[in-house]
Amino acid sequence: MPFRGLFIGIDRYSSTGIDELTCARRDATALEALFFDTLGGSTVLLADAEATRQRIEDAFADLAGCGPEDTVVIAFSGHGSETHELVTHDANPDDLAGSAIPLELLQEWFSRIPAKRLILFLDCCFSGGIGAKVLHVDAKPRSLLSAEARLAQLGGAGRIIFTASAATEPAYEHRRFGHGFLTHFLLEALCGAEEVVSGGKLSLYRLLEHVTSRVRAAALQGGKEQNPTMRGSIDGDVAWPVFVPGAKYRAAFPARLPAKVTSDLASLSSAGFPDALVTAWAGAIPSLNALQISAITDFGVLDGENLVVSAPTSSGKTMVGELAALRNVLDRKRALFLLPLKALVADKRRHFESVYGGFGVRTVEATGETDDIAPLLRGQYDVGLLTYEKFAAIALTFPHVLAQVGAIVIDEAQMIADRGRGANLEFILTLIRMRRREGIEPQLIALSAVIGDTNGLEQWLGARLLRRTERPGPLEEGLLLGTGHFRFLDPENGNEQVEGPLVRRLVGGKGSSQDWIIPLVRKLVAEGQQVIVFRETKGEARGCANYLAESLGLPPAAEALTQMPGGDPSQASADLRSALGRGVAFHNSDLDREERRVIEEEFRRSGSGLRVIAATTTLAMGVNTPASSVIIAGLNHPGDEPYW
């Protein structure tokens, strides 16, 4: 079926009595180029001075010569008027009925087009007055009140009218997007937004649903309401291929094409990352994985788009946050990483200094009352690492800090559902959202473990959801039964399996969980595995490390003992040294920060003599301690709170 298109965009008007716009011409140019590059056919672009009433009438007359099997798309971006006209370039504010395009006239022109599939996109509005309501944020109303009936008359069988807002609402353009809200998200959907594509095709109705949701969420971030509305219907559904920017689009917007990134880290050079930084990444990871590539090419993480990433542990989602942060650093903007625990901040700082220190990236941290926050207040940093609570205190006391930031990465975002610290994280996110109403809008990347229903979190944040459930390696989760058998779910097909018996209960033991833990850990270590045993309390973790050290007969963790800090050791420090002398450690809040650091680094060091750690949840959230096997002994925290 042949395609015909008419695209109209007007920023500049011949009358000085009509406010100019910023993005309408770009709206029309981008849509015309993208439709032509993908569907071919015949397209006409009328922009600014070309978009007179007569030229537009002539273009409609030409469309009247199409066939009934043609598909016709018309897009108008510019001012609407409160008296129900589309405002043309040569419109006279004192005679809009005679110089602009009244909706009654538009309906007449529509009736002459015989195509059975006619789609009209109106990125304008009919609320307000010409030249009115220019907001102090980066959103400007296209306000030049349209009766619902007049727009409804344009729809009907074979006609779909998609307006940027409801009949009595403004429609906004956003300078950061470089487009009106409707056009920006329409372009996003046409280019294959994951939420829209099915079977390699774009469903028109699904596309419009996606655009509606995205526009609503974006407007709400600025404290405004904009609800796109569809009128009319087309028999069946219109299915288009995924649109691909071609020669015409590249010529119009050479700097806006997504980077061609592959698994090869060197391909990041095409995204503007310098070779030295790519080399630094190559020392930390072997290649980019599918999650990271999708974040760049499909979700715009390097283009300032807000994103919620939900993926399993070790899936590479942290690298997505680092890509966004370093993109901002290269653009002379600052980035913040917000984490729930001091241990995570310390771990992240070691990582940043190791990978990016040689590149000149200045990393600072703030976790407690004694930290020197002067660099944060003065902007003398590139990447700041803060706990949730510290960020909240700084952002409230020194509001200018948030205005200096180009990107904020929220790690462990699933904590928002935690009864303890969830309120802190929700407060932080609310604070960031409210500042958007003042034009302060850093890119927001929320990194989360796999969660079920997000309950609209991504929409609340004005973000897209990048969800993956695939793990880089299989995970066998199951129960050790009282017979010594292991009942688990096969990671390949999800079927329940039973193996064993893997171990037998320790004869003559204590009659407690250690009668199973000791033989199980002994078996796993004999197989060359590194093991973490999670216990519910600090005392249980220390006791577990002690009886494992006594029972396993492992050689000393010599390097860890050498690195232990000096000074007057506490009882916990003495117990730790005793366990390390037999190849085992514990990790809990009784240890000081330096002792915990040594344990963490030694456990992940290749060839380390430290084979087993008994830990509380201080080690359970995000600290990089890769283990071959993890044993969870006891399923309740103190206070009878279950593990989550």
Image: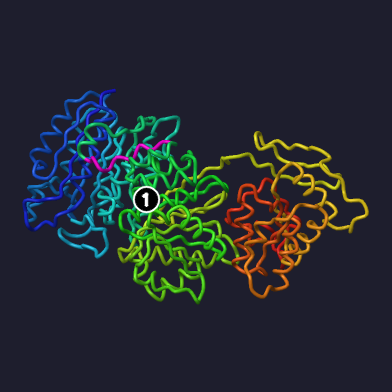
- Residue 131 image position (x, y, % from top left): 15, 60
Observer-nearest of 578 and 109? 578
Q: Colour scheme of this structure image?
A: rainbow
| Relative to 463, 73 lies left or right | left
Q: Is the residue marked by circle 1 packed among few (<14), some (14-19), or many (20+) residues within 10 Å? A: some
Q: Where is residue 234 shown, x and y percent of the image?
A: 34, 33
Left or right, 197 with respect to 626, comes to left
Q: Whole-percent x and y of residue 552?
A: 80, 52
Q: Quarter of the image containing the N terminus?
A: top left
* Residue 81 drawn at (x, y percent): 17, 53
Determine the image quadrant of residue 559. Answer: bottom right
The magenta stretch spans residue 256? yes
Q: Is residue 526 above or below residue 128?
A: above
Q: How many marks?
A: 1
Direction right: furthest residue: 508
Q: Please give the name of the residue rendered at 56% of the width and 46% of the height, measured from the top-left corner.
A: 314
Which amino acid lies under the numbered mark 1 shown in the image of this protein?
A: Glu
Which residue is nearer to you in this view: 339 or 306?
A: 339
Question: Foreground residue, 488 or 586?
Answer: 586
Specify the segment rendered in magenta. 253-262
Left or right of 529? Residue 26 is left
Q: Main secondary structure of the magenta part?
A: loop
Q: Secondary structure at mark 1?
A: loop
Residue 70 lies left or right of residue 278; in this view the side is: left
Is residue 365 highlighted in magenta?
no
Quarter of the image with the C terminus in it: bottom right
Q: At 41% across and 36% down in the image, what residue appears?
A: 262
Residue 271's quadrant in the figure?
Answer: top left
Compared with 407, 194 (above or below) is: above
**Residue at numbered disc 1:** 305
